[in-house]
Image (spheres, grey):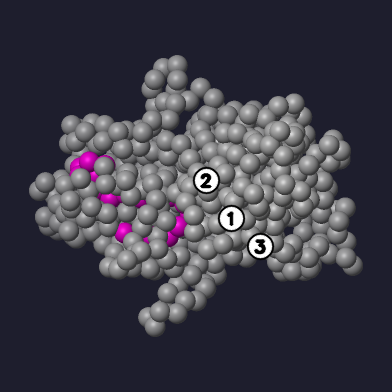
Amino acid sequence: LAAAALPASASAGGNDRGHGGHGHGHGHGQGRYQDVQLLSFNDLHGNLEPPAGSSGRVTEVQPDGTTKTIDAGGVEYLATHLREARKGNRYSITAAGGDMVGASPLLSGLFHDEPTVEALNKLDLDVTSVGNHEFDEGAKELARLQNGGCHPTEGCYSDKEFKGADYPYLAANVLDEKTGKPLLKPYWVWKQRGVKVGFIGVTLEGTPDIVSAEGVKGLKFEDEVETINKYAKELQRQGVKSIVALIHEGGFPASSSYNYDCDSPGAGDGISGPIVDIAKNITPQVDALVTGHTHNAYVCTIPDPAGNPRMVTSASSFGRLYTDTTLTYDRRTGDIARTSVKSANHVVTRDVPKAPDMTRLIAKWSTLAAPIGNRPIGYVSADINRDGTESPLGDLIADAQFAYGEAQDPETDLALMNPGGIRAPLTYTASGAEGDGVVTYAEGFTVQPFANTVNLKDYTGAQLIQVLKEQVSGPNEAAPKILQVSSGLTYTLDLTRSGADRVVTDSIRLNGAAIDPTATYRVASNSFLAGGGDGFTTLGEGTNERVGADDLAAFEQYLTANSSATAPIAPPAADRITVVR
């Protein structure tokens, strides 16, 4: 039994990162071609425990074309699946596509994501690119996650000093403004028994648009394609011919099923979004692309500039899937034989044994988090979801911020909430011993983990109309970001139109009255939006700013004031935006 409980990667050389690999398998004669296993995932966001509700499910298309959902995720299961997948693969690399931390549930977020780094060390992660969320707490905090040391203000959480990540964070396109040099390593080379595979890691060039200004202070984000092509040349000069790019930017497949055949022919099939242009322009010297950011699942081939197919993968988010890619290495050329690259996404199902080391890790941090996390802050009568153009949870959060704004300044007219700031649904089923329908602080934290403040600003009616049009134009034209609105604000979103015209100007009403372009409106929003985040530049132009308390405190106050065990909150109707399709 003791032997059976050993992780699969505990065989010889399991953690010997200096020599690469996980030491699986037994001695065989070396042929010309060697299969290298690349296991990858992305956008874990500190989800150590199985994510709740729709955040913890994936959709699977069946042979007859119907779909079913499968419960997925949780690091105890992810560890078991990865260790099982590595068995018998002597050449196995585990890589990630960024956003391992940041916007994390309370269990990790409360401790500045040290629990997640510890879990990834135990998972034998070899390398990851940074994502935008790695910058949520700034470059110094990212350096601490890499190098170790206790938190500058909160100190150590146990008697042992935090040792940092065993794996390198790659940030090839993130430069220090002063020195012009990459903030962290731009690339890393995995070596085992004469096989060499180089990894280049980048985050999306638009990171400063989606992270608070404080988080990216003193940093410059360069073009993804130019950066990867530059370092691919450098690796080639060093004799590394097999190259994988880890890119924290992604696409939108035509189907939300994780096992959708992305290369199936037909109108409207395949994949769209920023990764398509990136993939088409990255030098053919790069053999495969591991991507992320959009939280979608896909395994697609997109032609490189020479017209040859190249694998582009993403494993959804929150540890629900992992991708298993076979790279066939040609020992004679040192390159990957691209014609034989095979890849598939696999579900991190919860029907396998839990990895005991992960169970212990979760238990250790849960004990520390429990006194804070288990406190009830409200009651709900049913699941309050975050799905859809306008979501019930989006309405609830906007109403909470509006109520908070009114308490600070009775002149407050409305509140706006960005959909990307809502990280999980509120579920009716109890997550612990609190009882069904009870919302705990930990659950509230999982919904809004960013520690933004609720800020008030003045805008003209013309600016307010412009803000609503920015949802579907400019940087948000291709993938609209529909703000969640507080009670009283209504309008029509006509998706049969294009660009800014999709927001029908003369339909915009506040408490039944048309918006007066010359009047002043006081708007509550989180500090990220108030700073012009997510492409809402006009929100950054407001005046007479008042900075309030953090958004989770506003949400907590609203739930506590408006719900009780006998009178729980019902899901809002989500009927403020009329959508025409």
Circle 3 SS class:
loop
Q: Please provide percent x and percent y for residue 407.
A: 86, 40
Image point (45%, 65%), residue name: 256
Residue extent of the magenta highlight: 282-300
158 or 540, which is in the foreground? 540
- Circle 1 residue: 493
Left or right of residue 436, residue 121 in this image: left
Residue annotated with mark 3: 385
Give the residue type at disc 1. Leu
Identify which residue is drawn at 86% across, 38% down.
410
Label 3, label 1: how many angstroms apart (C-alpha)?
A: 21 Å
Question: Label 2 near label 1: C-beta < 8 Å?
Answer: no
Tag shown at residue 500: 2
Q: Is residue 20 above or below residue 258?
A: above
Amino acid under disc 3: Asn
Indicate the quadrant where residue 457 lies.
top right
Within 10 angstroms of label 2, few (less than 14), some, or many (20 or more) residues?
some
- Residues tagged 3 and 1 counted as in contact (Cβ below 8 A): no
Residue drawn 65% across the image and 57% down it: 577
Residue 5 falls inside the magenta stretch: no
Q: Position of residue 432 (x, y in %)?
A: 73, 64
Q: What separation in Å lies between label 1 and label 2 (alpha carbons)?
A: 10 Å
Give the residue at x 45% y 61%. 321
